[in-house]
Image (cartoon, rainbow, N blue to C red):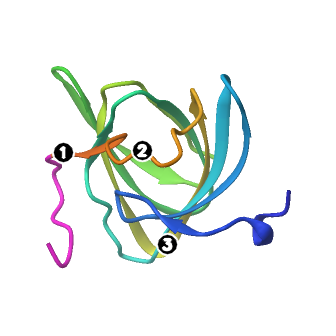
Amino acid sequence: MELADAGEVVAPDGSVVRPLLRLPGVGSFAHFELAPGQVSHAVTHATVEEIWYVIAGEGRMWRRQGDREEVVRLREGTCLTIPLGTAFQFRAAEAGLRAVAVTAPPWPTGSEDEARIAEGPWEVEGT
């Protein structure tokens, strides 16, 4: 599949997502993009875990799981996980941010409550 052929959707966190391929019962793969200076909504996932790999741009990601909380610098070559139940929020620097990610199990297409809005450290413009 070519990235240009993938449909574009806006994720519940506000990022632009191009769902790519999926293996039923195993996982799904997608391309994420956040515009320069944009901040996502903080969310937690109900059933999926993710592995992200940054392919271009820079930014930061905040993650909180239980009592553990951290902000990680995102730049080309950064790989990180978002375990089940982790609240997370990310923001793009001036160059924007692009990443690819594996979701396991596959993202539940059509789910209205997979990504639940959470409280994060950064204010989202327009909210």
Q: Residue furthest front?
A: 110
Mark closer to the observer (1, 3): 1
Q: Looking at the magenta stretch, what is its main secondary structure?
A: loop
**Secondary element at tag 1:** loop
Q: Is residue 72 left or right of residue 66?
A: right
Vertical relation: 32 (above or below) 80: below
Q: Is residue 6 left or right of residue 41?
A: right
Q: Which residue does the numbered mark 1 point to in the structure image?
A: 118
Identify the residue shown where x is 41% and y is 70%.
93
Identify the residue shown where x is 46% and y is 30%.
48
Q: Is residue 99 visible?
A: yes
In the rendered structure, which amino acid carries the disc numbered 3? Gly
The answer to the question of whether label 2 and label 1 lie on touching residues, with beta carbons closer than 8 A, is no
Q: Which residues are magenta?
A: 119-127
Mark closer to the observer (2, 3): 2
Residue 79, horizontal then vertical, whole percent: 58, 38
Instruction: Kindly indicate the quadrant of the structure image that contains residue 91.
Output: bottom left
Q: Which residue does the numbered mark 3 point to in the structure image?
A: 96
